[in-house]
Image (cartoon, rainbow, N blue to C red):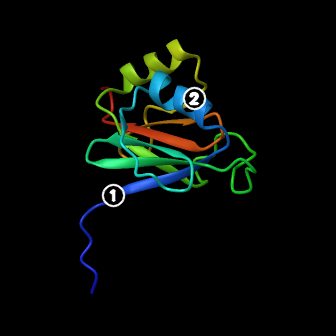
């Protein structure tokens, strides 16, 4: 039997690493962490005790073409404030799909990065 402890990291494909770095570092404010010298090109970020790994895929074979779709593959991050997250996204000009009264039992906000990867931000209602 496998004894699971936690998710260590999520990896997503990006076409242009510098565009992705601008979005994840400057717009979202994620802290970049050291990445081993793999042959692939990428950037790692810390999200609490987990990590987000961006891997450059210049041909874009595995990347989405459509708009925000919450039923498509995505990753979710719990945030401390729904209102502060909305304010930051609006300040940065990032389009979003807000669901403040989601049937999920918590508030949800969906966005896309420059490569159309879907990201979900979750928080308590009215936070």
- Vertical relation: 7 (above or below) 82: below
The quarter of the rendered structure image containing the C terminus is: top left
Which numbered disc, 2 or 1, marks the residue that appears first in the sequence? 1
Q: Position of residue 40 (x, y in %)?
A: 56, 54
On the image, which quarter does residue 3 sit in? bottom left
Instruction: Kindly identify the residue that appears in the image at 33 percent across and 33 percent down.
Output: 125
Q: CA distance from mark 2 to mark 1?
A: 27 Å
Q: Which residue is mark 2?
A: 96
The foreground one among 74 and 26 is: 26
**Residue 104 seen in render:** no
For residue 8, which numbered disc appears in the image? 1
- Count neighbours of disc 1 (C-alpha within 10 A) and say few if under 14, some if 14 to 19, many if 20 or more: few
Instruction: Kindly identify the residue that appears in the image at 54 percent across and 28 percent down.
Output: 23
Q: Position of residue 53 (x, y in %)?
A: 46, 49
Tell me the element at label 2: loop
Position of residue 38 in the picture relative to residue 116 (left or right): left
The quarter of the rendered structure image containing the N terminus is: bottom left
- Look at discs 2 and 1 and give the one toward the viewer: 1
**Residue 127 seen in render:** yes
Instruction: Kindly identify the residue that appears in the image at 33 percent across and 58 percent down.
Output: 8
The foreground one among 34 and 11 is: 34
């Amino acid at each position: 039997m496998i004894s699971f402890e936690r998710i260590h990291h999520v990896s997503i494909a990006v076409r242009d690493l510098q565009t992705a770095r601008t979005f994840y570092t400057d717009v979202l404010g994620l802290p970049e962490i050291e990445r081993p010298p793999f042959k692939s090109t990428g950037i790692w970020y810390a999200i609490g005790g987990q990590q987000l790994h961006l891997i450059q895929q210049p041909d874009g074979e595995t990347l989405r073409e459509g708009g925000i779709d919450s039923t498509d593959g995505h990753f979710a991050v719990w945030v401390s404030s729904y209102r502060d997250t909305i304010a930051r996204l609006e300040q940065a000009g990032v389009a979003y799909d807000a669901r403040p009264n989601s049937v999920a039992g918590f508030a949800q906000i969906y966005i896309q990065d420059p490569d159309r990867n879907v990201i979900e931000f979750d928080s308590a209602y009215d936070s």
